[in-house]
Image: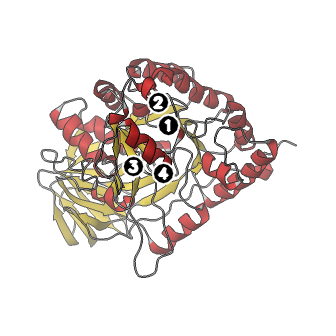
Amino acid sequence: MYDIKIINGQIPDFSTGKLLEQDIGIGDGKILDLGKNLGEAKKILNAQGKVISPGFVDIHMHEEFLQEASDKIHYDISKHMALMGVTTALAGNCGNNRMDMSFFSQYITKYGAPVNYLSFIGHNYLRDRVGIEDRYREATEEEIDQMKDLLQKAFDLGVVGISFGLEYSPGVSIREVEKLIEPFKNLDILLAAHYRKDAKYALEAVEEMIEISRRSGLPMQISHISSCAAFGMMDEALAMIEKAREEGLDITVDTYPYNAFSTFLGSAVFDEGCFELWGKGPEIILLTEAPYRGQYCDMELFKKVRKERPEMLVAAFAMDEEDIDLSVKSPGVMIASDGLLREGQGHPRAAGTFPRILGKYVREKGSLTLMDALYKMTLLPASRIGLDNQKGKIEAGYDADLVIFDPETIMDRATFEEPTLPPTGIDYVLIRGEIAVKGQQLLRENLGTFLPKVHNSSLSESKPQ
């Protein structure tokens, strides 16, 4: 007898590009059988008129800051991600982790989480750990060696790879990146990078990320191409990436479907000259946290808050909508949220990205077919992080991480005023074969687990003799 049987739904078959009408038998957290007239089940979910998708895999997000639990588990962003259909999320992006990786992995292993978690280890986080306080200077040889030791410990804990936040630490040179990576070149790791500079510098920034992959021989995930090149440079940036792929480099890209980025106001992103670079004024900056929540800036307010509250999360409406559309529909570009929240405040992408793609870009605009969108949100990112033998498909033996949604009604509701409103049109989210979400309610927030990456070597084995 199955634990759960889902009947009358349509599932995506990425090998044929078609939706198939099949029932799904689930047991012990796995998909056991597909077909019609399956056996009895303890619970039956009727998905008549609905699509049953693999759980969405968010390859680029920013985890919450966790504290040791007592009477309540302290999850923030991941519970909103589960409500929008994300079942697996990759944290530690843009060079930053929000806490010690040992604590993060142990916490999730102990308490569970609203989603399955993997993580990068961030270069800027490592710089902080070795005492580099000046983001405008390069690391010394001694500091790089210290970071290498920390990297090895992170790989032993099972991080996926290294993320870089070049814009956030302008002093980091490509030489520092190369020297840090050198001992780990034979590991099965993924690099990810937040570009060095956007707008008119976007093409140079893309070329630098390609060059890091070329020199290291390691695969590179170019983070949120939308916030790098959606200033009239998207066509050229995507063409550069495609040319690099034709040369044999392993370069992939993700994007999010909004024309505003979000980060901390005190970061180097907002250094002098940023408004001239974007061709816009401070009125594009929306403050998202108290005591200024919901206020747009003038120059006086911008300078005041940047000085007094540099950790304020803001949204900046700097990008071109047409370029966002180009990135979303470009073949091979994954959908990712770049979600970042603090106590439920921030950018609505953390709660709306995936339903927004299916509602706005598939159903309303027709920029993508449903099958293309689902592929970009499931199997493509799962393959990139080495989970395509477990997740990203609906096949016997795969994890029963599933989303049941109505393609006619699914839509994001999260706004910049209310950034965590759950979407409409999602009936159920299953994680490891159990119901995590029903409608707009999170029923279980402990079904996810930490997924360590097993690497094929170690620093001691890979050091030159």
Which of discs 4 and 1 lies nearer the camera? The answer is 4
Asked if disc 1 and disc 2 are in contact, CB closer than 8 Å, the reply is yes
Element assignment for label 1: helix
- Which residue is nearer to you in this view: 252 or 11? 252
Q: Amino acid at mark 1?
A: Val
Location of mark 4 (residue): 308
Q: Is residue 411 left or right of residue 99?
A: left
The residue furthest right is 465
* Count of numbered tags: 4
- Which residue is nearer to you in this view: 341 or 84? 341
The residue furthest front is 300
- Spatial CA distance of label 3 from label 1 is 17 Å
Which of discs 3 and 1 lies nearer the camera? The answer is 1
Which part of the image, by quadrant, shows the N terminus? bottom left
Location of mark 1 (residue): 269
- Spatial CA distance of label 1 from label 2 is 7 Å
Residue 43 lies in quadrant: bottom left
Query: Going from the N terminus, do you reach mark 4 or mark 2 first?
Result: 2
Location of mark 3 (residue): 339
Asked if disc 4 and disc 1 are in contact, CB closer than 8 Å, the reply is no
Q: Amino acid at mark 3?
A: Gly
Query: Going from the N terminus, do you reach mark 1 or mark 2 first?
Result: 1
Crowding near pointer 1: few (<14 within 10 Å), some, many (20+)? some
Location of mark 2 (residue): 274
Q: Is residue 221 visible?
A: yes
Q: Residue 242's x, y, as percent? A: 47, 22
Which of discs 3 and 2 lies nearer the camera? The answer is 2
Which part of the image, by quadrant, shows the C terminus? top right
- Spatial CA distance of label 4 from label 1 is 17 Å
